[in-house]
Image: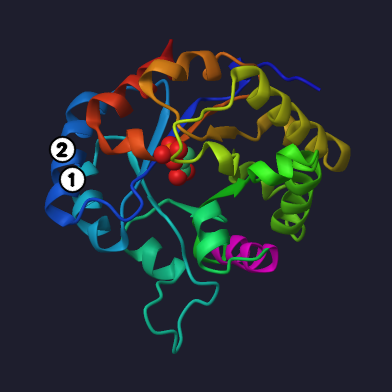
């Protein structure tokens, strides 16, 4: 099933990972604010490290650029040393939260079950989840890419109602393309995005597959964004490395407006 991308507003999100402490984050946010204030064609969000969130929220106020968390704890509060809850993010002015990023899955033990709890925690806290799915190179080469992505979708979205789903953004991020410079071809990415939309169409009423945005993530840069974003089921990008450089990130946003 393919649904015209023009029905969905493009969304470009930048994941700053463990880069940009408060001073650097403020400087990057200021550059984004200068260029993006007033643009109304693309939804834009940035996900700074927790410590930099307050200064970025303050800097981007009235710019139209939203702030996202990179992670959250499933519980609203408690004796969880070193953790941050969705409620805390919300109080700090955050609108979105990335859940299930492959680095969290691979390095910090975020299983499918944990991802599902974190999606629920986003809803409880009033945050819009950006749910990442994607296969490893081994899984792709073993012909398991679709099986893995379907399993991750089923786990992450399993307890949500159809009415909740349009608040969720999905991000297809093949692990072999993250931070490697090895980008999926537009055709490869489109194929998986169409599969994801089909998966939604098999389970939910038509407004769900038609309305949900599916971002591509994996070595997106200003130079390759247009080809990816021109695909009918690719509604935007989740950007890592290129989100740390204002001109690169702005180039990707510009490609989404074209
Ligand atoms: C990511 O971390 O979500 C990502 C897509 O990283 P990069 O753009 O650097 O591949």
Q: Horizontal and vertical percent for residue 239?
A: 42, 36
Of 230 and 61, nearer the camera is 230
Rendered-image quadrant of the N terminus: top right
The structure residue drawn at horizontal position 19% and vertical position 56%, both measured from the top left corner, is 21
Q: Earlier in the sequence, mark 2 or mark 1?
A: 2
Residue 181 numbered tag: none
Residue, x 46% and y 61% (percent of image)?
Answer: 71
What is the quadrant of residue 184 in the picture? top right
Which residue in the structure is indicated by mark 2?
Answer: 30
- Callout 2: SS: helix
Q: In front here: 87 or 74?
A: 74
* Residue 224 drawn above or below residue 172: above
Residue 170 point in image, percent of width and height: 61, 42
Point out the stretch of residues depicted in magenta: 112-122
Q: Tell me the element at label 1.
A: helix
Is the residue under label 1 in contact with that under label 2 (CB below 8 Å)?
A: yes
Q: Nearer the viewer, residue 26 or 57?
A: 26
Image quadrant in which the C terminus is located: top left
- Magenta highlight on residue 115: yes
* Quadrant assignment for ligand 1: top left
Q: Is residue 150 left or right of residue 125?
A: right
Q: Is residue 106 above or below residue 48?
A: below
Residue receiving disc 1:
59
The colour mode here is rainbow
Measuring from the top left, give residue 69's x and y in whole percent: 40, 56
Q: Is residue 255 left or right of residue 36?
A: right
Which residue sits furthest top? 258
């Amino acid at each position: 099933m393919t649904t015209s991308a023009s029905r969905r507003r493009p969304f470009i999100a930048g994941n700053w990972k463990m880069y940009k402490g408060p001073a650097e984050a403020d400087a990057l946010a200021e550059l984004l604010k200068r260029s993006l204030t007033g643009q109304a064609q693309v939804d834009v969000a940035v996900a700074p490290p927790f410590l930099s969130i307050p200064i970025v929220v303050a800097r981007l106020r009235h710019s139209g650029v939203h702030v996202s968390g990179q992670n959250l704890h499933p519980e609203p509060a408690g004796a969880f040393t070193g953790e941050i809850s969705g409620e805390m993010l919300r109080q700090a002015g955050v609108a979105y939260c990335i859940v299930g990023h492959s680095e969290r899955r691979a390095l910090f033990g975020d299983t499918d079950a944990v991802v599902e709890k974190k999606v629920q925690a986003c809803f409880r806290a009033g945050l819009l989840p950006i749910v990442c799915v994607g296969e490893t190179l081994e899984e792709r080469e073993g012909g398991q890419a679709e099986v893995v992505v379907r399993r991750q979708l089923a786990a992450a979205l399993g307890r949500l109602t159809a009415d909740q789903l349009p608040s969720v953004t999905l991000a297809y991020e093949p692990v072999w393309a993250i931070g490697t410079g090895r980008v999926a071809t537009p055709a490869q990415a489109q194929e998986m995005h169409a599969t994801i939309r089909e998966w939604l169409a098999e389970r939910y009423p038509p407004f769900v597959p038609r309305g949900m945005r599916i971002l591509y993530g994996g070595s997106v840069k200003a130079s390759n964004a247009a080809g990816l974003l021109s695909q009918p089921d690719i509604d935007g990008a989740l950007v890592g490395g290129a989100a740390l450089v204002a001109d690169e990130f702005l180039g990707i946003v510009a490609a989404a407006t074209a």
